[in-house]
Amino acid sequence: MACAFAVMTGLVTAGCASSDAPPRHSLDTTSRTQPPDARAASAELARDSWTLELSNSERIRGVAITTRHYRIHTTSGDEVLVNRMAPFAESMLEAYRLMFPDLPGPPERMVSFVVGTRPQWVRVVQQQWNAQAGPFLTVQRGGVTAGGISVLYDLGQRDTLVLLAHEGWHQYAQMVLRDPLPVWLDESVATLFEGFRSEPDAAALPRTVFRVWANPERFDRLREASQSNALRGLRELLELTPGQLASEGGDALTWYAQCWALALWMHEDPDRSAILRGLLADAHRGSLWRRVESRLGPRAAMLGSSRRVGSEVFRTYFDDDLDRAERSYRAFVDRVVRVGAREHIVAGRSPLLAP
């Protein structure tokens, strides 16, 4: 599966796309994460030594953490971050499956690398993708996900976990979806999981709460673009990729903020939310592009599936009238960025519910 570049909060990333979760859809997906002293009995199944070979003479010692669904290799020197990786990864997978309960668990453990520095990241990317690594190495700050493998590096505790959750969606999607999603949709869904809060519960143990609205960085960029009349039209939004924007010197951060708003536009409306869940279920079954073909014809399905950009999936599942959809989407954005909304975003609450 080809990779699509992503940009979030100044982080440039590249993302290409168990036990059963409870069959429910939830705005806030919450799971308890144990403190380090209880870690081995909960999320971590094993912690082994791991060595990253930078050259014939230079090696970096790290650890490989095994959980039920992940194998995480890290050389980060941040002990707090390292201790959070296992419970956070399992929590984010639970969040994906709570939001999309028709999707299965991954068929095997997903492999991730969270190394300490960018030079180490370059080395792992080269080791994983060999001759195909070149395009990935243009990423200056962030990570890459391809073939179900994610390679990130330490950007500080908060940013690294945000990146882990975003790239983790691409990783999971690559493992369970038979049909690749269009780039705009894959990246839009990934932004929903960037928002999370670490909160105490009744037993005073920390827990990770994923909240789709808790994303002030995306909100700030969306509001700025709205106020400066810099928002792209829906047709253009569906045709672009962050890699294209990066190569042309375009504003990928605004594109990502608009993808976040588009995902919320889908998620917050019960009918569209049900359509999104059904769309992803079709992608899992391998019937997404067949449905596009039955609705728009074989040429549209061929172009959409090969290019992974365009309006074909949107028109098939959400609205064939893009002008009408544009009006609805822009009205939604206007409501999201209205005066006083930011305090709700910071708190992880929907500003749409505010009086």
Image (cartoon, rainbow, N blue to C red):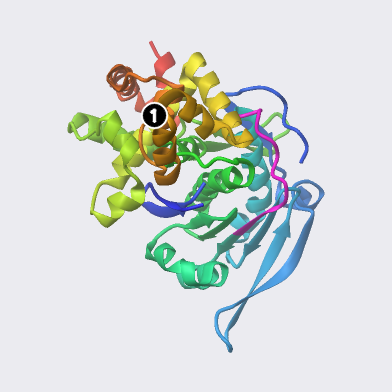
Asked if the magenta segment contains residue 166, the reply would be no
Measuring from the top left, give residue 182's x and y in whole percent: 44, 39
Measuring from the top left, give residue 229's x and y in whole percent: 18, 31
Q: Is residue 94 left or right of residue 188?
A: right
* Amino acid marked by disc 1: Leu
Q: Quadrant of residue 234?
A: top left
The reply to whether residue 291 is visible in this rendering is: yes
Q: Quadrant of residue 306?
A: top left
Q: Is residue 314 left or right of residue 71?
A: left
Q: Is residue 67 left or right of residue 119?
A: right
The quadrant of the picture occupied by the C terminus is: top left
The range drawn in magenta is 100-112
Q: Main secondary structure of the magenta part?
A: loop
Measuring from the top left, give residue 146's x and y in whole percent: 53, 56
Secondary structure of residue under mark 1: helix
Asked if the magenta segment contains residue 106, the reply would be yes
